[in-house]
Image (tube, helix red, strand yellow):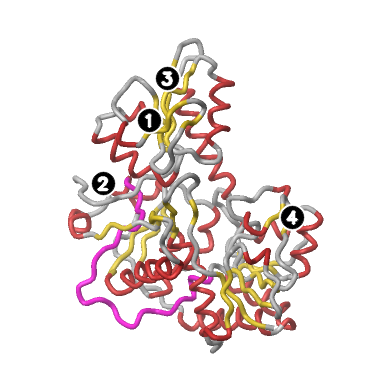
Amino acid sequence: MKFANLNFQSTDLNDSRYITINMGDNLQFMAVDNLYSSMQISKSEIEYLSIDDVVKYNGNKKLILPLNWAIFDPHWMNGDKLCIAEKIVPVFLAMTLGCAYCEEMFNEHNIQYLKQHEPIGCRDMETYQTLSKHGIKAYLNGCLTSLLPKREREPKSGKVFFIDAPIELSKYVSKQYLEDGVFLSQQYYFENTISTEELEQHVKEHYRRIAEEAKLVITSRLHVASPCVAMGIPVILAKKVIDARFGWMEKYIPLYGQEKYSEIDWNPQVIDYEKEKRQILEYNANRILFEKYKAEIESEMNAYYGLPESHYMNFAGFIRHNWTGAKEFIEKRWDKSKEIKYAVWGLIVTVDEFIEYIETEYPMAKLVKVIDAHKEGTFRGIPIVKPETIEAEDYYLFVLSVGACNEAYQMCKRKRIPEEQYYLVGDVYMQGNFEK
């Protein structure tokens, strides 16, 4: 039996020559490599798979695949059933339900499959509670990115890094932080000719720069906060709505929802948990190496995190929250008896669902413009245009792509489009050049 891990990956954009890469997604594979390193397992002993290979693998040897990922990732689902290849032995170390989760996923097939691989290590309390409800043994393990090595030294003249920091924070941040800050994102676009090796280099360079240059990191991203805490970098985690994916991080740092922005401690300290980190790495290593250790790790890890009662919105609720906001925006401004024009920005998978809601509830409303930076052609008979064509016209604009919200916000400001005329489904992040 051989060890395995997942390769660095990107997401194809349909009908486009571009791909998008989420730094945090790929960091989770680096975290598994870090676990292997702590076990003194060399790279030559590890077989790297594409995420699609998890379903298709049929090699000569069985592979042990530690997972720090979403339980019901669409890549290894066949309809509503988990279909991981028979020659792969998954070790569920730090799993989350993920955005694809729905209660129907806990059918007889999936429950029995997860039971075969008990106990399931869970990243967050929502996942732990849901598995437990269905009779699946589980324990709270946090994310493996919280086990990355502490950096060797602090920068002599470090900078404040704003990494997808909510734009609403700008009025609370000191002028010096804003003027001297470094503004980064976790989401990047590349032409689809880029190689896996180049993607890996971009991800590693991104986190290397943070480790070597940051004296403080301000972020809304889980896979920025978690590794930075592990690396010994002071972190402020601020997000408009804190959902259940983040709850386990309270073990280490405060979590600031928008209602608590005025209470932020702008000088947080380095969190030292190196002893505990080594112990958790050992627990996870033993999950991989010894089946007999399963019962003990369940008890030990639950004792460490304490299984606090979750008081955060679950992730499915967070997604619904975004759509509820759009509907509330419409209900507040639209009259069902009048003709209304509207545009959508971002041809995401749920765009039809959104338009069908409008057609049902507001039959006098008319879709007049379709905007997408990465697609061409037509949608519902309307030409797809680029974002730069937007002007302050007599229609309402709905930005449905979370990844486009920053660009849309800046463009609406430049084009002097009134705030009551557009709605952004996602958060807007700080990008520098803010006025106090």
37 is higher (above) or lower (below) than 75: below
Is 101 on the left or on the right of 430, as rendered? right
Indicate which disc residue 81 carries. Answer: 4
Q: Position of residue 119 (x, y in %)?
A: 71, 70
Q: Which residue is mark 2?
A: 171
Q: Estimate how packed mark 3 is, as few (under 14), some (14 to 19) or many (20 or more) residues with alpha carbons within 10 Å.
A: some
Residue 198 vs residue 136, the one in the foreground: 198
Label 3, secondary structure: give it.
Answer: strand
Q: Which of disc 4 and disc 2 is earlier in sequence?
A: 4
Q: Are marks 1 and 4 in contact (CB under 8 Å)?
A: no
Q: Estimate how packed mark 1 is, as few (under 14), some (14 to 19) or many (20 or more) residues with alpha carbons within 10 Å.
A: many
Label 4, secondary structure: give it.
Answer: strand
Going by the numbered disc 1, the residue's amino acid type is Tyr
Q: Is residue 112 magenta?
A: no
Indicate which disc residue 341 carries. Answer: 3
Is 67 on the left or on the right of 159, as rendered? right
Q: Which of disc 3 and disc 1 is earlier in sequence?
A: 3
Going by the numbered disc 3, the residue's amino acid type is Lys
Q: Which residue is mark 1?
A: 422
Q: Please provide the residue range marked out in magenta.
A: 144-167
| Alpha carbon separation for disc pair 3 and 2 | 34 Å
Q: Which of disc 2 and disc 3 is earlier in sequence?
A: 2
Q: Is residue 153 magenta?
A: yes
Going by the numbered disc 4, the residue's amino acid type is Lys
